[in-house]
């Protein structure tokens, strides 16, 4: 089981702030494919990966990163500075 967290507009599209996901995904990209296949709201949230960032156990990561040993995956839009 992995905790999956959604922030900002990703949360709005998915309709949840967090959920526990039982997955066999090997990478973040595989997890996104599994989630997108669930329902249209997930597909909408993950439609444009260029507008998303991902953190694994609170460390910024890539979509090709392995999920082995990961406890938490967070999806969020890019941060803007100021």
Image (tube, rainbow, N blue to C red):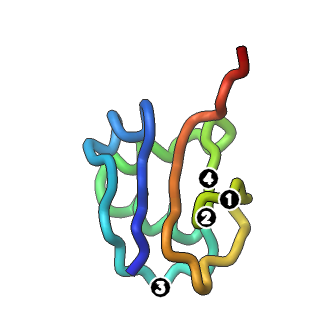
Q: Quadrant of the C terminus?
A: top right
Report helix, strand or loop for mark 1.
Answer: strand
Quote the CA–CA distance across marks 1 and 2: 5 Å
User: Distance between the Cα atoms at labels 1 and 4?
Assistant: 8 Å
Q: Do tag 2 and tag 4 residues touch (Cβ < 8 Å)?
A: yes
User: Is 60 situated left or right of 55 in this image?
Assistant: right
Residue displayed at 54% across by 41% down: 76
Between 10 and 36, the one lying in front of the other is 10
State the residue at coordinates (42%, 62%): 4
List the residue tagged with mark 4: 54
Instruction: Give the residue at mark 1.
Output: 59
Spot occupied by residue 26 in the image (x, y as percentages of width and height): 60, 81
Q: Position of residue 50 (x, y in %)?
A: 68, 39
Q: Are marks 1 and 2 in contact (CB under 8 Å)?
A: yes
Query: Which is more N-terminal, label 1 or label 3?
Result: 3
List x then y, in percent, for residue 30.
57, 71
Relative horizontal placement of residue 74, taking residue 65 as reference (left or right):
left
């Amino acid at each position: 089981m992995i905790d999956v967290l959604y922030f900002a507009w990703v949360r709005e599209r998915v309709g949840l702030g967090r959920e526990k996901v039982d997955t066999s995904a090997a990478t973040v990209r595989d997890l996104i494919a599994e989630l997108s296949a669930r329902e249209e709201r997930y597909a909408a949230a993950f439609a444009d990966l260029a507008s998303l960032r991902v953190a694994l156990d609170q460390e910024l990561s890539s979509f090709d990163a392995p999920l082995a040993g990961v406890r938490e995956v967070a999806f969020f839009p890019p941060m803007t500075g100021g």
